[in-house]
């Protein structure tokens, strides 16, 4: 699927999984979307596709996506959103490749949208 082995040193940044809820802005009274985390902060490793993989998805809806790797998390679904802790940007989850093997350390590859969701940046 994705090239390269995962090492602990690859997991340098953090993200959160959650949902987007509509809340009222205290100052203006308008409804604004706000990211609500459903998990704690999790370390992730950005992954890159090989040239062959990039060519095979050219022209599809997966062309404008990124892949990240996280330790296997049972309760992550494609209905959730991903917020990067460092930037606060929120992205949709397109696809989850679960690792259901019976090994002590397993990783999931999560395909997310390349661009943040709408104008919401996840900082509330």
Image (cartoon, grey):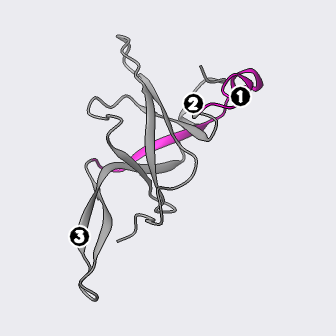
Camera-nearest label, 2 or 1: 1
Question: Would you name the residue on which mark 3 appears?
Answer: 23
- Identity of the residue furthest to the front in this view: 59
Q: Earlier in the sequence, mark 3 or mark 2?
A: 2
Q: Secondary structure at mark 1?
A: helix
**How many residues crowd mark 2 within 10 Å: few (<14), some (14–19), many (20+)?**
few
* Quadrant into which the N terminus falls: top right
- Identity of the residue furthest to the bottom in this view: 27
Q: Which residues are magenta?
A: 39-60
State how far apart marks 2 and 1 are (Cα): 23 Å
Question: Would you name the residue on which mark 1 appears?
Answer: 54
Front-lying residue, 47 or 21:
21
Check whether the beta carbons of the residues at disc 3 and disc 2 lie within 8 A of each other: no
Front-lying residue, 47 or 29:
29
What residue is drawn where x is 71% and y is 28%? Answer: 54
- Identity of the residue furthest to the top in this view: 102
Marking on residue 77? none
**How many residues crowd mark 3 within 10 Å: few (<14), some (14–19), many (20+)?**
some
**How many residues crowd mark 1 within 10 Å: few (<14), some (14–19), many (20+)?**
few
80 shown above or below 103: below
Image quadrant in which you'd find residue 75: top left
């Amino acid at each position: 699927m994705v090239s390269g082995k995962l090492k602990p040193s690859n997991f340098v940044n953090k993200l959160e999984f959650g949902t987007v809820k509509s809340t009222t802005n205290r100052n203006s009274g308008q409804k604004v979307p706000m990211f609500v985390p459903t998990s704690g902060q999790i370390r992730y490793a950005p992954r890159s596709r090989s040239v062959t993989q990039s060519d095979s998805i050219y022209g599809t809806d997966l062309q404008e996506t990124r892949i990240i790797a996280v330790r296997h998390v049972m309760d992550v679904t494609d209905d959730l959103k991903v917020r990067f802790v460092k930037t606060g940007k929120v992205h949709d989850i397109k696809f989850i490749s679960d690792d259901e093997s019976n090994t002590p350390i397993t990783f999931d590859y999560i395909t997310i949208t390349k661009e943040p969701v709408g104008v919401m940046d996840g900082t509330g």
